[in-house]
Image: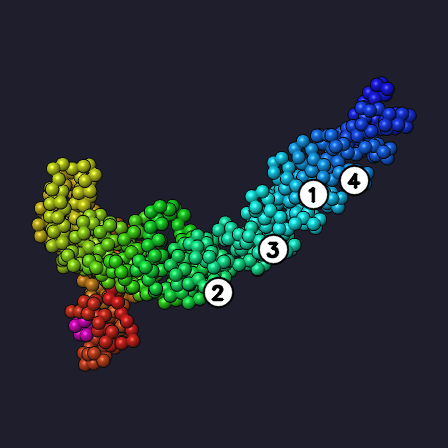
Amino acid sequence: MATVSAQMIDAVSEGNLEKVKDLVNTYGIHCCQAWDYGYVLLQSAICNRFNEIACFLLTKGSKVKNKYSEDQTPLHCAVQNGDVELVQMLLDNGADAAARNRKNDTPLHIAVKQRHAPICKLLSQYGAPLDVLNSQRQLPFFFAITKGWKDIVTALLESGADVNSEDKKWNSVLYTAVTKGDVDIIKEILRFKPAIENESNKKSLTYAIGRFHDDQIVDILLDYGFTLSLGEKTSKILIRNTIVNNHIMAMEHLLLHCGANASSLLHVAAVESTTPDIVKSLLHHGADPNLPDKEGLTPLHKLVTYIARQSITGSWAHAVTKHEHNRFEILKLLFEFGADANLETVSNKRTALHLFCEDAFNVGEPYTAQIIDTLVKFGADLHIVDKNGNTPLHIAAGYNLFDVTNVLLKHGADAYAINYEGNTPFQLRSDSAWAILLNHYFNHDDNPATVINLCKMLYSRFSEYQYFYSSDIVQKNNACISLQEYVVMATSLGYSIPNKEVILSKNVDYRETLKEFEISCKQEVDCMKQHIIEGSSLTMYQFLRKRTHALAICLKNEHISSFLAQGDYKEMYPVYDRVIEGHYIRGTQRKRLLDKVDAKCHLLMPSLPQECALTLLGYLNNKDLSVLISVLVPEEKVTPP
């Protein structure tokens, strides 16, 4: 019989169906103990994918299970091969759907791993357990979810898998699906009605709020009926996640069903929200944009501080990016719902504009201009002072913030405003900002004295040191150059600067360069004397020699105004471009005030010709004009430029 046994085993392993039939028909399926009543032969045939031989052996009564076997059963092998008909035949012949192999896998484990939905259904119909762990402590159901195989999940659910089943960590199938972020599988699980009361199911919602920026999963769970508990609504983490991930529906739920305070949340949303949607929702639910928090800060205070400080740690190479644009939209939203730009902080009496100027070290000019323009548009007062009497310009100049200083000056900030210590923005040791301030207020009456005082302050400051660090020397030299260049530019235009020689004698190493700079100044001045602005009889030189009131009158000429607005002078006169720009800005600001007075001038001075009236108005500064306008046009609130 040993020979017959060897022949049979060889025939099966070689896939020789005819020989197998011949041997079985001659000797019978049970003739050899080594065949284990055909079990060994059947297992070999299926594992080697000789299905015809396997079917033949089954028809001859081959044994399909062996309680002593620790290896793959024929059913395991058939499932592995994905042969539905053979699996059906094995099950019909009594194969054990719950059998385990050496890895403790049931046939269902293998069917799931093979992603074979029909076999999964078939096995479950024959009693395959759906909640059995293998050696890796994996449940078939959870394996399918982690792989994202919706068809297998559906097959198991339709076969009776418990939709509320939990894994070894007590995580439900719904929670597991939510952690994977698979919307289709989540919807499929919800179709089979998981229990809302199940603790693991309940935590699916809070997980989704904290994990995903996409509203879809959160909204699906809320629509299904999951809620946020009263304990969770006080959680700072939950609130922050709702805001940061922009979950509108979850926020509505917190406000409407959990008693969350819209005004309190607005302080968080103004800073943490990455889109305007949450902020808009809170404002529509009655959030007060002017309500201070326990630190005395309004949402506006927090937002502008955040915008300014983010530039220090964040990358602004891609500004203005989508997020920065959204922050700007949030800023506008606060104003549209009544935020007061001039509310002061409790601690130091600073407005939103003060706070922005304090921290905007690295924002960049385009975004700086956008923020300050918006603040000013909605009423930010450029001249309001903090507890030390500092205007926003004092702060910006004091921190050497070029872009901020420049934008503030364009809006009419006063470089000669005096704080409670008697200092102007010039005197806050803002060496690098001196050039910007001097060029903007180039022909101010106080400039000569200011330059002399700055020079004295500069050298007295550095004389206090017994030795200089190289950075100190560079700082002193650069500051001195700013003053010296102003003196050269001013004298080239015909202005008198006392102690000119003393100022120019400083910084010996720069003298040769300063001589070259003086030549450039004189060349530009000569050109300006010859440059008659088209459509007028005014030369550029004459324009630069005029005071602010006279500049405003000049700008009533549309040709002059148009030429300066186009900015062509910047290429024509690179040395004096900021001076010209400063004149144009100051003249334009003054002209706006004069235009408002002109409309009511007949009430104020009815018998005087307009030219005489303009001459008289020239004795009033911008602040005086603003007061006059508020009297003549009481319905219009005017902030002096």
> Badge 4 is on which residue?
91
| Mark number displayed over residue 195 | 3
For marks 4 and 1, the one nearer the N-term is 4
Mark 2 against mark 1, which lies toward the viewer? 1
Which type of secondary structure does the marked residue at label 4 adopt? helix
Q: CA distance from mark 2 to mark 1?
A: 44 Å
Residue farthest to the right, as pictured: 26
Front in this rendered view, residue 103 or 22: 103
Q: CA distance from mark 4 to mark 3?
A: 34 Å
The relative height of residue 637 versus residue 246 in the rendered view (above or below) is below
Q: Which residues are magenta?
A: 611-617
| Mark number displayed over residue 129 | 1
Residue at the image point whose x is 65% and y is 49% from the top? 162
Which type of secondary structure does the marked residue at label 1 adopt? loop
Q: Position of residue 553 (x, y in %)?
A: 23, 67
Front in this rendered view, residue 580 or 375: 375
Three-letter code, disc 4: Leu
Question: Is the residue under label 1 in contact with that under label 4 (CB below 8 Å)?
Answer: no
